[in-house]
Amino acid sequence: FNVKNVSVKDIRRGNVAGDSKNDPPQEAGSFTAQVIILNHPGQISQGYAPVLDCHTAHIACKFAELKEKIDRRSGKKLEDNPKNLKSGDAAIVEMVPGKPMCVESFSTYPPLGRFAVRDMRQTVAVGVIKSVEKKAAGAGKVTKSAQKAAKTK
């Protein structure tokens, strides 16, 4: 994998390369996800901030809002705005990454839409991303060839 004008020193774990002309990757401000709690010793409530493993990124993400508890099998809504979640529960939650992170909805880019939630050195939950609220573009590095392409538009 070779990119002009990008040094090996510039590349870090969790970086995402994309097409600057066709749906360029953008930093996620927050995202809505469907999670299934596998094994958490206590209860998960709003404000819980475990490490989220999505593609190669390992970033702390906060459960900003527990929107609804759903049935694991049918996907039917069981409860609006639950106070907490425990092992075996499935829910729709709003999550906010602690550091800049690039994720996509599972329906458009499956590899960037799957994640595992880790805490206490074990997997606590797994999930898929339903929708992403993107931050304004321009945070990433733009190569010279990408700048030329933007000028020709």
Image: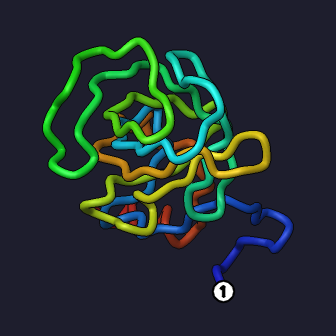
Residue under numbered circle 1: 2
Q: Nearer the viewer, residue 86 or 62?
A: 86
**Total residue callouts:** 1
| The quarter of the displayed image where residue 56 is located | bottom right
**Considering depth in this image, is 97 or 78 the residue closer to the camera?**
78
Q: Which residue is drawn at 52% across and 18% down?
A: 45
Q: The residue tagged with tag 1: helix, strand or loop? A: loop
* Residue under the image location 36 percent in, 48 percent down: 129
Residue sitting farthest toward the right: 9
* Image quadrant occupied by the C terminus: bottom left
Compared with 145, 136 (above or below) is above
Q: Which of 28 and 144 is in front in this view?
A: 28
Q: Which colour scheme is used?
A: rainbow
* Frontmost residue, 27 versus 89: 89
**Does residue 6 lie above or below 44 as drawn?**
below
Quadrant into which the N terminus falls: bottom right
| Left or right side of 96 for 109 | left
Q: Residue furthest bottom?
A: 1
Residue under the image location 16 percent in, 31 percent down: 77
Percent position of residue 20, x then y: 41, 64
The image position of residue 94, as x and y in percent, is 39, 28
Task: Give left or right: position of 149 versus 52.
Answer: left
2 left or right of 152?
right
Badge 1: how crowded within 10 Å, few (<14), some, or many (20+)?
few
Residue 134 locus on image (x, y percent) = 39, 38
Q: Which residue is at 51% across, 29% downward?
A: 96
Image position of 31 with respect to 103: above or below = above
On the image, the x and y values in percent for residue 142 come to 57, 58
Please name the amino acid that badge 1 sits on.
Asn
